Every structure is written in C-alpha cells, then in structure tokens.
Amino acid sequence: MNLLTTSFKFLNLIGGFAVVGALLSMAFLLINKDGYLTTSGEKVRRLLKASSVIWLLGAFGTIIFTLAQILGTSLADALDPTVIRSFLTQISLGKYLAFQALMATVVLLFSFVAKKIESLIVLLALTIAGLVAPVFESHAASSGSHSLVIGSLVIHVVALSLWVGGVIALALLSPEDRAVAVPRFSQVALWAAIAVVISGAVNAWARLNFVDAWNSSYAFIVLGKIAATVVLIWIGYLHRKTLSHKDSINWVGFARLITVEAFIMVVTVIMGT
C-alpha cells in the first residue's frame, strides 16, 4: 500500500510539474501572434494533454490510496462512496486533495480548447494553486514553526514546479522552438533555483533543528537533495555559459544536457515523495 501511495504521489507531482512546464512554454517561452498560439505553441498542446491526464490520474490515485493508508483498511473499503465523500467533504486533507483533483480536471478539459495566452495564464495559475493546496495539510503542518514551514513549502513547490516543469518542456521541444524558449527560460530558471535553495534550506532548518534529527531518514533525503541541487546548479551554469555563445550553440548536445537535468530533477522529486 505504501508503495502504491508513493507511486501515485509521484505521478501527481510529475504530472502537475509537466503541466506547469507546458503552460509556461505556451504562454511565455514561445512566440505568439496577437495573443494567440502559433504553430510552435500548438505543438506543445500534446504535452499539455498527456501531462494533464497523468496529473489527474495521480490526483485521484493519491486520494484513494491516502484514504486507505489513513484508515488502515483495504483498497476495497477505501473505495466505498460514503467513506470517500466523508473524506473529501469533512477532513481538511481530503478537501485540499479534492481541490487539487478539481484543478487537474479543469486543466485537462481546457487543454483541448485554450488558444489565447490569457486563458493559458489562468490555467497556469490554477495548476500552481492545485499543486500548492495539499501543502497546507502536509506532515510539516504539525511540526514546529508552523507558519515558517508552510510558507517555505509553498515557495518551494511553486519554484520547483516552474523549474522542473520548464526543464521537462524544454527537453521535449524541437530544436527550433528550443532556440527561442531557452534564453527566455534562463531568467526564470535562475530565480526559481534561488527560491528552491533558500526555501528548502529554511524548511530543512525548521525540521532538523535538534541533533538527533540528523540521524533520521529525512536528514539523508535532505543531504541527497543538496547533492542533486549542486549538480543542477552546475548544469544551469553550463546552460548560461553556452547561451553566451549563441552563434555556435550545438543544440543536439544542449538537448542532451537538458535531458540529463530533467532526469536528475525527476529523481530528486522521487526522493521527496
């Protein structure tokens, strides 16, 4: 049960991050015409649709398996309509997860028809809101320094979704579209990385503020994330160094570097689920 719960949480996060990346690239990173998508933006719609489906499956799976884990019952018992309704309408965590699933449903439905940049920006905001919602009832909410922990987690999730999602989108763009998107994303990635590092450090400090905590499994996860972040920042430095020589960029090698970056990010997300 724990493995299935973790798996659906992972699908939930990665699907949501990929949705953010698709919407970010469609709305801001690629060229538009008079506020409407061009051919380049339309190509990303396939990524938006696929990632929306993954996010929706992950969101609903997270609800069911989280409920089963909380109740300590079988999956069949957790699928009882009355139990599900009570969880989603009476329990705070259930309400937040229901809101997330609702946002995933809305994004999936509008992923087929959204063409104006304004509508894509609204969907991006709804996606980020859906990803952030469960943070307010996370395991950190019951720890010390409640406001500090929750605030840092909100910033962490928002920045991480922009960073990871953007890298996933870049890895899947065509070389022509990537040439346009990468310089624009570079600035977003820089500030997102800074926000991820600072918010992550604050959150870790709030939860590892006593000696024995550094012998916990969470401490080892934090150390692993620190190592991964150092590698990602180094790759980001290589990106910016490459962009300083725009006339001689090897886009095939650049794409491989982005793919490696996306892979490391996915592994880091798995570590945190």
Image: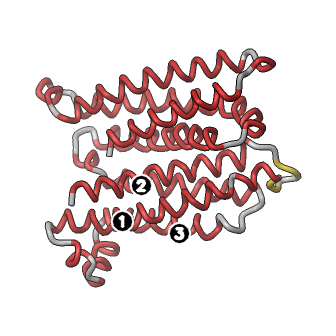
Q: Residues within 10 Å of mark 2 (few under 14, many from 20)?
A: many
Tags 3 and 2 touching, CB below 8 Å:
no
Q: Nearer the viewer, mark 3 or mark 2?
A: 2
Residue 174: image location, x then y, percent: 72, 41
The Cα–Cα distance between marks 1 and 3, rounded to whole angstroms, is: 13 Å
Residue farthest right in this picture:
34
User: Residue 116 appears in which quarter of the rendering?
Assistant: bottom right
Circle 1: residue type = Gly
Do the residues under discs 2 and 1 have CB atoms within 8 angstroms?
Answer: yes
Q: Residue 162 location in percent, x, y? A: 56, 41
What amino acid is at disc 2?
Answer: Leu
> Which callout, 1 or 3, points at the residue further toward the start of the chain?
1
10 Å neighbourhood of mark 3: few (<14), some, or many (≥20)? some
> Which residue is under mark 3?
105
SS at badge 1: helix
* x and y, in percent, of residue 217 in the image: 19, 35
Residue at figure coordinates x 33%, y 54% from the top left: 7
In this view, 31 is above or below 92: above
- Work out how far the residue at label 2 is from the one at label 1, CA to CA, in angstroms: 9 Å
Q: Quick check: 50 above or below 154?
A: below
Quarter occupied by the N terminus: bottom left
* Disc 1 packing (10 Å; few <14; some 14–19; many ≥20): many
The residue beneath circle 1 is 61
Q: Residue at x 48, y 25 (%)?
A: 232
Q: What kind of colouring is applied to the model shown?
A: secondary structure
- The disc, 2 or 1, on the residue closer to the chain's N-terminal end is 2
The residue shown at (71%, 20%) is 243
Total marks shown come to 3
Q: Which mark is residue 11?
A: 2
Q: Can you tell which quarter of the image residue 143 is in?
A: top left
Give the Cα separation between the discs numbered 3 and 2.
Answer: 15 Å
